[in-house]
Amino acid sequence: MSIAIKRPRLRLKGGTSLWIGGGLVATAIMAAVLAPWIALTDPVMDANLMNAEIPPGLEYPFGTDAQGRDIYSRIVYGARISLSVGIISQICNSLIGVTLGLTAGYWGGWWDDLVSGLTNLMLAIPSLVFALAIMAILGPGLVSLVIALGLTSWSYSCRIARAQVLSLKSQGYVQAARILGYGDLRIMFTQILPNILGPLIVIATLGMGGAILSEAALSFLGLGIRPPFPSWGSMLSEARDQITTAPWLSVFPGLAIFFTVLGLNLLGDGLRDILDPQSTTRRA
Amino acid sequence: MAEPLLSLDDLAVHFKIGNMLGGGIKTLKAVDGVTLDVKPGECLGLVGESGCGKSTLALAIMGLLPPTRGTIGVDGQEISGNKAPDRMKMARTVQMVFQDPYASLNPRQTVRRTLADPLRLHGVTDKAEVEARVADMMARVGLRPEQADRYPHEFSGGQRQRIGIARALILKPKLVLCDEPVSALDVSIRAQIINLLLELKDELGLSYIMISHDLGVVEHVSDRVAVMYLGRIVEQGGWQEIFENPRHPYTRALIAAIPDPFHRAAISAKAKARGEIASALNPPPGCHFHPRCPLKADICVSQDPVLAAVAEGHRAACHFRDRVS
Amino acid sequence: MTVPLLKVDNLRIALAGDGATYNAVENVSFEIGRGEAFGLVGESGCGKSITALAVMGLLRRPLSLGGGRIALDGEEIQDASPAEMRRLRGKRIAMIFQEPMTALNPLSPVGKQIAEMFVLHEGMGWNEAMDRAEEALRQVRVPSPERRIKDYPHQLSGGMRQRVMIAIALACGPDLLVADEPTTALDVTVQAEIIDLMAELCAAKGTAILMISHDLGLVANMCKRVAVMYAGRIVESQAAEAIFATPSHPYTRGLVDSLPRLGERSKRGRQRLREISGVVPSIAAYPAGCRFNPRCPSVTDVCREMVPEATPLPAEGLVRCHHHG
């Protein structure tokens, strides 16, 4: 016998991480969207060697870099690149992972063996190394960055999707759908997918943080966004030589990465709490 | 005599269990040579305990598991190991009511969608007609029209089972397989659902296969009864024959196991089965029931009993079928 | 007058929910004599299981003891410390659960788990305790106990596991065995055996039984007296025979009438089952007055306003209904 205690769907107290994370992510997205209006100068064109390496102050809140460009403006514009790389590549990962995981779990058999093998292979190769290899072939640039990151870390979504499908496949309503004559694809999309969306969104949110970090790492290594266009990773890369003389060059892009990734991770954790089927009492 | 709606001929469903490395492959004979038929308008009760193969049999009848041997004939359509069923046609002929009303409804679909989607899938395109059929079906199972846009979690167990029944009937099937339709419900709700099923059967001229371990329910609803043990049918016949004149010791054991507060002393200890049900992976030789049987003799170990007639329409698979207890 | 073995008096169990506290159980009183089998019957959510947990001192948040007295052999135990309760459990009160797999330690052989009871509660050495464990397995009729003693729980069937649970529970000859749906997860023929075994062993050892179940027939068959719970209150308690012959509360009457009983159909033909209308109320929405009133066929205004008092029945029983007599 069990006693049903209805849990309210959204509760501020239990969802602190959701709200902090959501706030941080929202701030980053606002910065990216509103960049042309909130930036003080043009991030690329307004170079002025007269203003080089000015420490943070009233005129330049985050200081200036070696070419005299305003760091604050570059971070605001950099958010556009870092976030779009993170979001687009994670959407690619989710699409690949969910498609493979859903079909593998549902159909089973040789297809499942193949997908599971591929997933394990992907998990065994560090995804950053794999992305490096792809970048080396495609050459640096925004598009190749998105492709490289979007093809290399789908294994998590795939595993989660497959495991969830396996547990839902034998549920009565999935069997009922088969008995009613639903086709496999219809069952996957109308019966299974809506019920496993929660954990997949959580994984996607966490994956976005990972993608932003990978973008930073690749740009830092000189394989990502090429100067003079600002991404947080490329800014860090350029600031490498001045880390002792002008630490603000690395501190502010570093903090931007830190807070955005932290925000995404907190948001992911918070979403898990409200979307996880186990956390809401279903049965009386 | 009317043509049977469903006929199983020597149906077997076997599974391969294990792999080459871990101790070799074993064959699980979940259903092993079942011959049965259901006539239009008839209710067949299917009785058995865990491991007897009734769930596998149900899935095979629904066309979800291919037969290893034998054939399934559903309203003129024949299914066998190398002949898959036409799922759309099957869907309009056979439907199923599930045991667990919590797991058998999609938590993200309203009642309306649960009922309307199958209609659209099966070619009912007229919006008004879909609406009318959904409303009619909801009324038949005792749901109010304003409940159509609610989600399953807003309903109690009994109401969910009503939705499950409505879904099974929305395509106007001829045969409905009810898999323990009341055993997951509160005791005080069961009578409502049993009455509903019986009323719908008469109103819509349905045939039922009623799978249950509750003999009281089976006796109440069935016209004929089949008793399964470890993949085989051990006895089948008219309900009155089975309950008043059971010929297989397993059937007698099942009846003796029902706690009857009115006949406390009447339960004969002799009829009771001993010990545990054997694993279907490794069933005992000869008659599968012999290790638990009070009538066990040498012949039971060495020879499979055949399902032979003891009376008109009453057959039992026991070497001592003529020894009335 | 002799002191009863267990006396539960005016028990109230509080359930802390979102910002409100509910009474999951209230005003529950019953007595169990030495060696007596007493049954507590009700549907899921009626509070029967948590009443058992309260007797065991096992209530955990969000449940807590809200009031009332529980006395074992005249000694009040409702305020006993956790350490004192631990000493009582196993030695004087033992419990078996519906799903033995959750109560057995999966990493320890069953023999050791039985022997542990002797070591813990009787200060025996391990060697002697293992011999006693083998003996205990033999008593619960596990075949070849000398081999089974080394088995892990997952190697045993459901029925065998429940036998092991009984062996553990009865190891130290407790005064009271609390059995919470002990056979619900088992097949009917196995259930019959387990019930016989429990009754027989308890009779031999003089152990009293508090049997919790949703199955009125099963409980009435095994117990001398039965109490029926509905929505957190005892609505009726009577001798087992009487509860079927002369059920006094409308809810009990509804339960007795609503289930198809074996043999009914051959005697009287198929009759529509008597339904109990409506649904079991949830704890947050218990109706005022008599909690059965929204479902009761003979409801009047007084039922909606006043909580019915206990009315004694002729043969040592009571009923809480305004319309009794």
Image: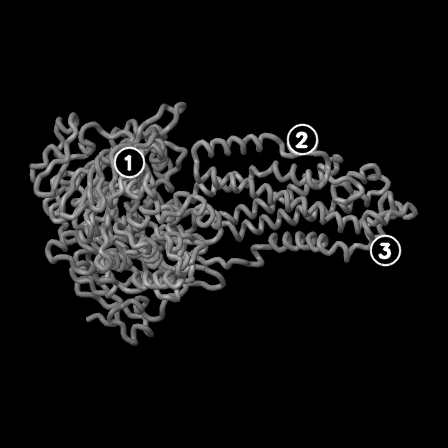
| Distance (Cα) linking label 1 and label 2 | 52 Å
Res A216 visible: yes
Q: Which residue is mark 1?
A: B80
**Residue that mark 2 sits on:** A133
Camera-side residue of C1 and C232 = C232
Q: CA distance from mark 3 to mark 1?
A: 83 Å
Identify the amino acid type marked 1.
Ser
Residue A58's tag is: 3
Q: Nearer the viewer, residue A134 or A253?
A: A134
In percent of width and height, residue B21 lies at 41, 23
* C67 left or right of B252 in image: right
How far is mark 3 from mark 2, CA to CA? 44 Å
Relative to C158, residue C4 above or below: below
Of residue A43 and residue B5, the one placed in the foreground of this image is: B5
Q: Are marks 3 and 2 on the same chain?
A: yes
Q: Is residue B105 left or right of residue B3?
A: right
Total numbered badges shown on the rendered structure: 3
Report the residue at 81% width, 49% height from top: A43
Residue B91, which numbered label? none
Discs 1, 2: same chain: no
Question: What is the chain identity of the residue bearing mark 1?
Answer: B
